[in-house]
Amino acid sequence: MNKLKKVTILVPAYREAKNLPLLVEALDGMVRGMNDSGRLYEWEFLIVNDGSPDDTAEVLARLRAEDPRVNYVNLSRNFGKECAMLAGLDYAKGDAVVIMDADLQHPVETVPQMIEAWEEGYDDVYGRRRDRGKESWLRKKFSLAYYSLLQKTTRINVLQNVGDFRLLDRRCVTALQELRESQRYTKGLFCWIGYRKKAVEFETHDRAEGASSFNFLRLLGLAMDGITGFTISPLRIASVLGLLVSLIAFIYLIFVITKTLFFGEEIQGYPTLLCVMLILGGCQLLAIGIIGEYIGRIFNETKNRPVYLVDTYNGDKI
Ligand code: UDP
Ligand code: MG
């Protein structure tokens, strides 16, 4: 008999003690459904505990004792979802890896569809949200504006309404493992690696238990990482703006000189001067800020620290 292909379900988890048993149960149901229809695979449920302060670690140990398909990695502290995903990719053993959230927002029923597309020869089968679920109007608007900005300024095509829920072939996983930047924007990295992609639509569910760990500030940070990690166009914009302002200033200078030569000079308004100074000061600070963002990134990357540290794998100290 041919050896079965292995599929890893990779789940980053932070404070998900209540959700994980529900998730493993749902996955088990999905696998049983697939077995019944004769689509046999070897399964691994790899859960990366991203330094949760609650009893996620104990829950994981229990889940593994009950079900040998469960493997788990405990990180040494909270490194953030982006880093936890890389840890998962490093530990995943599957020929394909399906990344999904622990809070059951990503429907397990979509996984068989993804696997089908993978069998057709696609390397990166990504889930596209049909709607964005219960999200505030403001968050939706921001997200829309952000993606259009990112699409216009980068050469890679970062897709709207596409998150981390996707199936990756082994060669995509290998490619992603090579991208070890520490300020990660995985959504962009998925697009950067290329390969044959296909979309599968899904309906976002509401979070099963607990609350989202991504507040506005954290999303803003991620958004900045997305921009500084994939494009230097803000720097270009700053240069163009500088050039434009200098040009206008030069034209104005010629105008003032000509006017003085022909009509004499009367003292000009002090408020106008102040306004111009403030506006220019603002532009300068903005430009320095933009440069600062990139320097900060260089600083963080040159330290060359590991992206994450592992405490235990399946209970064994690493
Ligand atoms: N997550 C993580 N580390 C963190 C924050 C979140 O691994 O520091 C995981 C979390 O357990 C979940 C996924 O990332 O599986 C998505 O998080 P969440 O549901 O809080 O975000 P949202 O759905 O609002 O984007
Ligand atoms: Mg969620």
Image: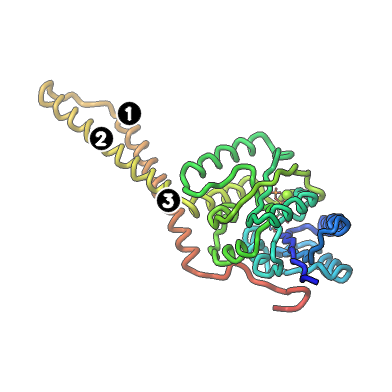
Residue corresponding to mark 1: 271
Q: Which residue is the extreme one toward the bottom?
A: 317
Q: Are marks 3 and 2 in contact (CB under 8 Å)?
A: no
Q: Is residue 314 above or below residue 195?
A: below
Residue corresponding to mark 3: 232
User: In whole angstroms, how far apart are the C-alphas of marks 3 and 2?
Assistant: 26 Å
Residue 208: mark in rendering: none
In the image, taking residue 233 as reference, residue 88 lies left or right, namely right
Q: Earlier in the sequence, mark 3 or mark 2?
A: 3
Residue 109, horizontal then vertical, whole percent: 80, 50
Q: Is residue 131 above or below residue 49?
A: above
- Select label 3 or label 1 by which is in front: 3
* Residue 22 visible, this orientation: no
Residue corresponding to mark 2: 249
Q: Quadrant of the C terminus?
A: bottom right
* Dot 2 alpha-carbon crowd within 10 angstroms: few under 14, some 14 to 19, many 20 or more: few
The one nearer the camera, 20 or 154, is 154
Q: Earlier in the sequence, mark 3 or mark 1?
A: 3
Residue 228, horizontal then vertical, whole percent: 48, 52
Q: Which residue is the extreme one toward the front?
A: 1
Question: Label 1 sits on what residue type?
Answer: Pro
User: In whole angstroms, how far apart are the C-alphas of marks 3 and 1?
Assistant: 36 Å
Q: Quadrant of residue 283?
A: top left
Q: Which residue appears at 61% of the width and 51% of the height?
A: 197
In the image, taking residue 136 as reference, residue 58 lies left or right, namely right
Q: Quadrant of the N terminus?
A: bottom right
Q: Are marks 3 and 1 in contact (CB under 8 Å)?
A: no
Q: Earlier in the sequence, mark 1 or mark 2?
A: 2
Question: Label 2 sits on what residue type?
Answer: Ala
User: In whole angstroms, how far apart are the C-alphas of marks 1 and 2?
Assistant: 17 Å
